[in-house]
Image (cartoon, rainbow, N blue to C red):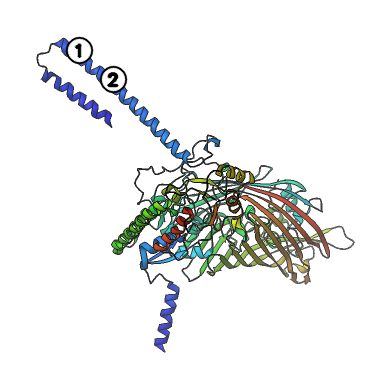
């Protein structure tokens, strides 16, 4: 700012010259003009030099300020400075007017995190075990149609949170992007990249941030808020693999669908969240439909227009003081359309008979979660207990069969399951977990035929070492007792050694 | 009979309405220090909920449904900020479906945004631990900064509740005066303090304010437990310094601080960063008094 004022005074001086020296000759004037010009350039040079020195000094001061804190500054690699909001200089007035949260800043980029999830797996069944635990016998079940599985494998549909081979596996690299879009919406996208390079869109949704009366609306593709563990991504699970009821009644990905969710948080004395979801119904297990060719072949209806699936849920959490947290939830899901195929053979015949069944299905869920904050170093003394009960009821009727007499008759399939697990911080940064999960305490079909199958269950223990907030190593052992056919069981051990690495922005410590 | 029913209905209404009816402002403080500030500045005009207890690590806390419930009805949330509560406050606020308290709104107050920060501008490199280039967030242990924050809070409360603006300003002035008075005493008490080793750089604002040298930290890098090698190094470094004190928080492992203090012949103290849950301005100053006494080494 000194620069223009100096030029101005020089100009003023130039103007004054003819008045103070009226008798000067033209030559003198020319000489004076040259002198003034040279003075002007001279000053301009000096000012530029001063500006350069000032800038240098400011840079040094900033660098010193940055280096004052860490004593090990010299050992830090030079790195491009992260984009930080202007840190208040010593002279800057306190920003009373600022309503913003101070953050390390992302300069309008979404918050990005990449989570790597890999493991070493071994079971006593040459690696079949990891898939088998998701195919425990139900009278109605996930294996809707054998053709499907062959087709899926041929189509290279390899992304599965449940699958593992004996040896090294890379489950997924999960890329998450989240940001506040504008004053009206938050949005997030979660992409899972498998070791084969397939990209699976886990979630991509928008959520309102500005609705009144405790309302929020979420839309896009998302994990349903049904139950408790359903909305968790695999790297957030307390165990390497999903529990038996979710795995068998909802499939690898749980209730994950396109649709819309509305939640309401009324101002009741205790935390109460009520929600409803309307979902397309493209499900792997609960609400599965066959493809068009099979539907034609088996005299089944076409897949109905969506949305075909809806859920309601309520969660209640009493206030128990700062160190305790307890939440109960009840959830219900209904699908308007469910189709499956049951294959059977008759003694002495080679022909496989296929009955096609169609109808609707209900799923009930109860969940309870308790957390205790032990306030010890690195989570020592923390306890987390969670338990859920799921019950699936499918009301189907036989749409086509090689036996015409059964066509049109009704069948009700009921399968339930529960898991209970506890995790305890036994030392700083170390936790131990124990889980019991069971599918099919009730595992029956009623209607034209009535039959009751047995249950599959599993005991799992693990130890997790959280080296820091961003990395963890886990060892897990499970003893499985899986019903694979009527009166046929597979009992086997399974071991996982898992790593989970979180790169990028600080994760949320969600409930 | 009708009277009984109406009494019942009224009490039910009061129950459902919670405490909102009693005080004009419903305030949620993330920590006891922020709660102390709210109590001292807003007094009876605030119905206050504190989300964390002094024995909890504010950086490691997890979201609880009861936090979400408290934030749902809040007119103002008072946080320490600068990413200290980053793991739980943003998800809890988002779940609370209360637009009034989201960052950028008048209902969001962040103490760290009101003062200058130390340790800012470092490299955003996780090899250096759980670093936060925006700056060290633990501003609440510096009484002078807290006085500045109290004035900023009074200004914010005045925006939300203009009728009591003068009351808020006076209360902040009184708090600042009490701080100024104590600071003079504490300055002389701490003038000769030989130095402190902290577990984590969480009390640097207090040390910097009174010119007490920080001679080392138990953890070599933030958020990562110390190695034996680092502790041996510390022992070597501290030889020749006598009479200092090793200070750690209740949620930090006591073994390393105790051992270090033994090895170098220092005192060791376990002090919470936060004042008691129900502290007000005076309680906050009494809490700092404990820190000053521990650092000065006077009984």
Give percent across and percent down for residue A163. Answer: 72, 51
Residue B187 image offset from top left, x and y in percent: 39, 51
Whether residue B241 sits left or right of residue A347 in the image: it is: left
Q: Quick check: can you spot residue B213? A: yes
Q: Point out residue A206 in the picture as x, y percentages from the top left corner.
A: 51, 53
> Considering depth in this image, is A511 or A383 the residue closer to the camera?
A383
Query: Within 10 Å of the Cα at label 2, are there few (<14), some (14-19), or many (20+) other Cα atoms?
Result: few
In the rendered structure, find residue A31 and report the number of the disc placed on it. Answer: 1
> Residue at left 75%, top 54%?
A131
The image quadrant of residue B158 is: bottom left
Q: Which residue position holds label 2?
A: A42
Query: Does residue A172 appear left or right of residue A111 in this picture?
Result: right
The number of callouts visible is: 2
Mark 2 element type: helix
In depth, the one of A78 and B74 nearer the eye is A78
Label 1, secondary structure: give it: helix
Q: Mark 1 or mark 2: which comes first in sequence?
A: 1
| Mark seen at residue B157 | none
What is the quadrant of the N terminus of chain B in the image?
Answer: bottom left
* Above or below for A17 versus B199: above
Residue count near mark 1 (Cα–Cα under 10 Å), binned few <14, some 14–19, many ≥20: few
Same chain assignment for discs 1 and 2: yes
In front of the other: A64 or A399: A64
């Amino acid at each position: 700012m000194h620069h223009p004022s100096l030029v101005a005074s020089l100009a003023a001086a130039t103007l004054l010259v003819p008045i103070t020296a009226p008798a000067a000759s033209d030559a003198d004037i020319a000489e004076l003009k040259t002198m003034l010009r040279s003075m002007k350039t001279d000053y301009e040079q000096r000012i530029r030099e001063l500006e350069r020195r000032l800038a240098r000094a400011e840079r040094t001061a900033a660098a010193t300020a940055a280096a004052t804190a860490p004593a090990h500054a010299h050992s830090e690699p030079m790195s491009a400075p992260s984009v930080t909001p202007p840190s208040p200089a010593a002279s800057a007035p306190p920003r009373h007017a600022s309503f913003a949260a101070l953050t390390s800043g992302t300069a309008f980029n979404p918050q990005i995190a990449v989570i790597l999830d890999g493991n070493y797996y071994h079971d006593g069944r040459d690696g079949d075990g990891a898939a088998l635990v998701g195919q425990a016998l139900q009278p109605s079940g996930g294996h809707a149609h054998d053709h499907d599985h062959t087709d899926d494998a041929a189509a290279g549909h390899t992304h599965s949170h449940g699958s593992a081979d004996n040896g090294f596996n890379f489950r997924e690299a999960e890329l998450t992007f989240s940001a506040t879009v504008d004053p009206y919406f938050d949005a997030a996208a979660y992409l899972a990249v498998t070791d084969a390079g397939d990209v699976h869109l886990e979630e991509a949704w928008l959520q309102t941030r500005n609705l009144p009366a405790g309302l929020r609306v979420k839309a896009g593709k998302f994990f349903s808020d049904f139950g408790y563990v359903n909305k968790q991504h695999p790297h957030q699970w307390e165990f390497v693999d999903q529990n038996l009821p979710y795995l068998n009644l909802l499939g690898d990905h749980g209730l994950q669908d396109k649709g819309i969710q509305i939640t309401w948080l009324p101002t009741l004395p205790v935390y109460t969240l009520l929600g409803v979801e309307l979902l397309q119904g493209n499900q792997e297990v609960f609400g599965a439909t066959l493809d068009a060719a099979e539907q034609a072949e088996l005299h089944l209806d076409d897949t109905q227009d969506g949305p075909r699936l809806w859920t309601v849920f309520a969660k209640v959490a009493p206030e128990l003081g700062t160190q305790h947290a307890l939440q109960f939830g009840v959830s219900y899901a209904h699908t308007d359309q469910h189709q499956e195929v049951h294959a059977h053979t008759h003694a002495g015949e080679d022909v496989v008979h296929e009955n096609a069944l169609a109808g609707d299905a209900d799923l009930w869920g109860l969940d309870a979660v308790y957390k205790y904050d032990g306030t010890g170093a690195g989570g020592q003394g923390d306890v987390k207990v969670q338990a859920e009960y799921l019950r699936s009821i499918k009301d189907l009727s036989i749409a086509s069969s090689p036996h015409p007499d059964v066509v049109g008759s009704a069948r009700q399939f009921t399968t339930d399951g529960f898991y209970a697990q506890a995790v305890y911080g036994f030392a700083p940064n170390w936790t131990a977990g124990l889980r019991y999960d069971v599918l099919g305490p009730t595992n029956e079909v009623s209607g034209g035929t009535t039959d009751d199958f047995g249950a599959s269950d599993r005991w799992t223990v693990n130890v997790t070492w959280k080296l820091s907030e961003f990395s963890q190593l886990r060892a897990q052992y499970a003893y499985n007792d899986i019903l694979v056919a009527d009166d046929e069981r597979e009992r086997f051990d399974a071991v996982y050694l898992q790593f989970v690495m979180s790169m990028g922005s600080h994760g949320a410590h969600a409930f | 009979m009708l009277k009984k029913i109406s009494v019942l209905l009224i009490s039910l209404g009061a129950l459902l309405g919670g405490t909102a009816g009693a005080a004009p402002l419903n305030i949620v403080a993330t920590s006891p220090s922020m709660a102390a500030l709210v109590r001292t500045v807003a007094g009876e005009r605030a119905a206050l909920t504190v989300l964390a207890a002094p024995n909890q690590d504010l950086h490691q806390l997890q979201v609880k449904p009861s936090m979400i419930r408290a934030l749902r009805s809040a007119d103002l949330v008072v946080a320490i900020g600068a990413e200290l509560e980053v793991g739980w406050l943003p998800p809890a606020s988002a779940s609370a479906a209360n637009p009034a308290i989201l960052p950028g709104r008048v209902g969001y107050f962040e103490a760290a945004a009101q003062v200058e920060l130390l340790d800012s501008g470092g490299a955003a490199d996780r090899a250096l631990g759980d670093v936060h280039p925006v700056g060290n967030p633990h501003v609440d242990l510096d009484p002078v900064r807290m006085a500045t924050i109290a004035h900023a809070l009074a200004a914010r409360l005045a925006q939300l509740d203009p009728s009591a603006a003068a009351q808020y300003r006076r209360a902040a002035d009184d708090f600042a005066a009490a701080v100024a008075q104590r600071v003079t005493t504490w300055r002389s008490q701490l003038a000769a303090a030989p130095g402190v080793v902290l577990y984590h750089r969480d009390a640097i604002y207090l040390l910097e304010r009174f010119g007490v040298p920080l001679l080392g930290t138990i953890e070599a890098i933030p958020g990562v437990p110390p190695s034996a090698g680092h502790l041996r190094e510390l022992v070597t470094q501290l030889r020749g310094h006598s009479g200092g004190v090793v200070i750690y928080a209740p949620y930090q492992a006591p073994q390393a601080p105790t051992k270090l203090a033994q090895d170098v012949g220092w005192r060791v103290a376990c002090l919470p960063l936060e004042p008691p849950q129900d502290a007000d301005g005076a309680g906050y100053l009494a809490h700092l008094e404990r820190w000053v006494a521990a650092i000065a080494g006077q009984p």
